Structures are given as structure tokens and as C-alpha cells.
Image (spheres, rainbow, N blue to C red):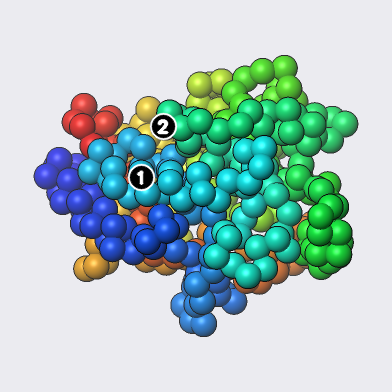
Amino acid sequence: MTDISAIRQALEAGVAFLESAQLPSGEIPLEISPSPEMSSDCVREPVVFPAAVAARALSITPCAVRVHLRALDFLMREMEPGGLWRHPSSAKPQHYDTPLDVDDTSLASAALLAAGREIPDNRRVLFANREPDGLFRTWIVRWRPYPLLTRRFFRYVAEPRDVDAVVIANVVFYLGDCAETRPAIAYMLEVLRDNREMRSTIWYGSRFTVWYFFSHALRTIAHEAGEMIVPRVEAAVPGNALELALATSTLLLWGRTPDVRPLIEAQLPSGAWPNAGFYHMGQRRDEPQPKTPWWGSEALTTVFAIEALSRRLLADGSPA
């Protein structure tokens, strides 16, 4: 097993990389690429999502406090009326081309409230954004004040009533176990029982991602989820450093103590972990391949690796 000093050394190098990579605004940089390997033609994309993920993931890492606080500040500035967020950040000229969404709103809201920041009560908006069966939709559809942009988005990119299991998991993580979320909780458990993780998500490219977000949402609500997720993670082989980091955190969320040596060995000399595509433009049931582009970055992979190493230190009884 890896000793504490090796974990701390990797953790400190990763945090130092994030401090250098984080933009002055507090945004965590993300790139788009035509391939999931993110190996060529990578272009930076101004996006809210990585900062929302980082604001949750880094909350357990005291040595990352500067990155964490700057990510929180960024989320506060990107918040729109009513305590809502959209995927592109305001630095993107086409910011308003993309509707508000439940995924970014839930992750940002949960992170900010956990850090003691005040935001408007947005729960009614989320509760109202459900299908008749109680499942949360991805998009908060408002045709005004940008009806032409919104119509174009839903003609070429998405559908107004899109439902995605990872998005649902993030809403449940934020809202918790309540009458309004119980159909969503039951749905996630059904997805796991039926082994249809990858058929349940439109936007995310890996079953490790589904297991990770499901675990954050269900670990204090439904123990049976862990009984299904843990053996699948242990039997699966991560295909890259991103999946390895997600697998490590997932096991630790359910009380397991995986060996983190492979994750430390995957760290680059810069202190970062390698880039890999985390989500894409969407894949529906009748489509053999996801639509491009893919989104990912070394910074985002590093956020997940830091979370995993921090959770391992906490599991060993050592402050992260």
C-alpha cells in the first residue's frame, strides 16, 4: 500500500498545478476536442461546470483552499437571477445560446450552500422541472427573452424534455431525500438493477462517471446502491487516468480503501493528471457514437484525482 507521504506529495503537486492552471476569474479551464482522447485540436471553452465540480470535490482538501474559494467566487459571479446557472460561462460570446440547466445549477448550489454562501431558493424551479413520472429534466426551458436562440438550440443540440441519469443524480445530491426526489432515487436504483448505466445517460461518456455521481447522490440514502456499484467498479478496468480517479473516489465513498499507487503513478511531471474526454455533445439510443465535441482538460482530471487522494487520506485518519 502507498504510504502517507507519497499521497501527500502527489496531492501537493496536483494542487500546485491547479493553482497555476486556474484562470484569474476562478474558472477551471476546460477544452473541447473532436476525440475522447483529447489528443489533438484542443480548444479552450469557457464553461461553468468544472468550477462547480471543483467546488464540491476540493471542499475536503485544506491545501486546495485557494483554488476552492476562487471557484466559489466564480460560481457566485456566474449565477443568474433565481439562483440558476447554464453550462457556458459569461466569457463565451454565445453564452445565452444555451438554456439554463439542472446539472450546473444543482452542483453549483450544493457547493455554495455547503460553503456557507447565500443563494436564492431555487428548489421550486427544480421541482417544477420534472416529467409526469417525477424525473428531472436536464434543461430549464425559458423561451424568452431569447426565443430564436432557444429554438435553434433545441433543433440542433438537445430536446426540451431530455432526461439524463447523471443529471438526476446531481439533483438528488443537492435536494436530498424528499417526496419530490423519491421517483428519481427509485429510477437510479432501477438503472443499477438493470445494468443499464450507459443507456441512462445522454451526455456522459463512461460508466465510471455514472457510478461516481450515483455514489455521491445515494451513499447516505440507499445502501443497496453501493452493493451494486462496488463490485462493478472492482471488476472494471479503468481506461485512463480520469476513470481511475473516478473509480478510486467511488470506492472510497462506499467505505473501501483502494490502492492509490496506480493513480499516483499516472501523475505527470507538471503535477497534473492526463486529459481525457469527460462528456460530449450527446448520444441517443438510435445513435452508434456520441456527437462531438468532447469536453475535458488536465485541470478537470486533476480535480478528480485530488478528490480521490484526499478521500484516501481521510479514510486513513489523516487530514487531507
Q: Residue at x 76, y 42 (%)?
A: 137
What is the quadrant of residue 125 in the picture? Answer: top right
Residue with the most extreme top position: 179
Residue where numbered disc 2 is placed: 115
For marks 2 and 1 on the same chain, the one whose residue lies earlier in the sequence: 1
Residue where numbered disc 1 is placed: 68
Is 25 situated above or below 141? Answer: below
Is 13 on the left or on the right of 115, as rendered? Answer: left
What kind of residue is marked 1? His
Q: Residue at x 55, y 40 (%)?
A: 107
- Is the Cβ of the residue at disc 2 closer than 8 Å to that at disc 1? yes
Q: Position of residue 289 (x, y in %)?
A: 70, 68
Marks 2 and 1, how far apart in space? 10 Å
Is 105 on the left or on the right of 277, as rendered? Answer: right
Q: Position of residue 45 (x, y in %)?
A: 54, 69
Of residue 254 and residue 91, the one placed in the foreground of this image is 91
Q: Position of residue 306 (x, y in %)?
A: 32, 48
Q: Residue at x 70, y 61 (%)?
A: 96
What kind of residue is marked 2? Ala
The answer to whether residue 62 is seen in the rendering is yes
Q: Residue at x 51, y 21 (%)?
A: 220
